[in-house]
Image: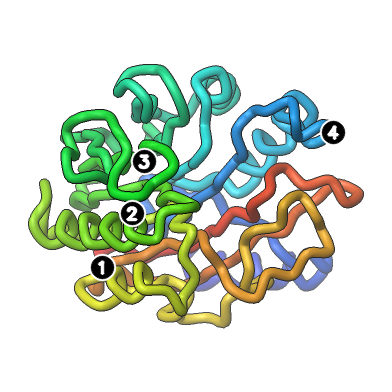
Amino acid sequence: MNKSFRAILLVFALIVTGCAHVPAPDTANEAAFRVMTFNIRLDTASDGQNAWPERRELVRDLIRHEAPVLLGMQEVLLHQKRYLEEALPGYDFIGVGRDDGVAAGEFSPLAWRRDVFTSIESGTFWLSSTPEVPGKGWDAAYPRVATWAILERRDGGGKVRVLNTHFDHAGVSARTNAARMIAEWVDNGAGAGLPTVVMGDFNADPDSDPYAILVGGTLADSRSVSATKPYGPPGTFTGFDIARAAPMPIDHIFVSPDIVVTEHAVVTQHWGGRLPSDHYPVVVRLDLP
């Protein structure tokens, strides 16, 4: 059966079933890949009915359903990371705790489907003037990290490098300088010149200086260059309020110009008003060169 005929059958099946969105699983033989960034919210008892034990299965099931090939998460404590590693056995995870470079504090981990990618090189740096040393940068309230990897496709389709991060929520100078660090890494860091994906919770909307720095050089916002109309609301932060309509996103996926963005979505899945996190995940579909 040729690819065109299979595509016709898929469209017909969707029409017959009335299904609005059935994510086709990515495989190592496809050029297109689904990528997700997701702030899963740290585990804190102060969240009450939205605390991690009450919603961890919602996070797990959402990730399983979207089946990203590349996954970046934020606000992940060690026991949350361990839960997701067990719940998502097809993925390899990397990342360190931001407080000590080992296990303490929040992680900004990267994960990828091990049947699609293998890691060539990876690392972490701190968003500060001493990037190799755990600690806060500028006016940041907390230490912040960037986790990166150079990955090679198992089908021989080449390499891609990926970075996941979480900018500070309080420090204006910290966010601006962090954006400059990421832009510098894109241009001159390990694997410079490879197709590049940068994602995370940037605590910065499209009208901010950090955003302007990130899109002012090599990178483009996947939302703005998507070949199809972006799906979902513009805002990504909800505070666990399903009725909240933030006017602009603070979670983004940026790409280098050699990557084609075919789809962009802010996923608003909920269960009777219960949300898996206080952020909506962003999911894009990319054509890698």
Separation of disc 3 and disc 4 at Cα? 28 Å
Q: Which residue is mark 4?
A: 49
Q: Which mark is residue 174?
A: 2
Choose mark 3 or mark 1, whichever is in front. 3
Q: Nearer the viewer, mark 4 or mark 1?
A: 4
Report if residue 52 is visible in the image.
yes
Q: Amino acid at mark 4?
A: Gln
Camera-side mark, 2 or 3 = 2
Q: Residue at x 43, y 31 (%)?
A: 107
Label 3, residues with CA under 10 Å away: few <14, some 14-19, many ≥20:
many
Q: Is residue 111 visible?
A: no
Name which residue lies at 46% across and 79% down.
Answer: 207
Q: Are marks 3 and 4 in contact (CB under 8 Å)?
A: no
Q: Which residue is mark 3?
A: 144
Task: Choose between 110 and 258: the one closer to the eye.
Answer: 110
Query: Mark 3 or mark 4, which has the lower sequence index?
Result: 4
The reply to whether the C-beta atoms of the residues labelled 2 and 3 are less than 8 Å apart is yes
Q: Is residue 125 left or right of residue 13?
A: left
Instruction: Judge depth for marks 4 and 2 and give the one in front.
Output: 2
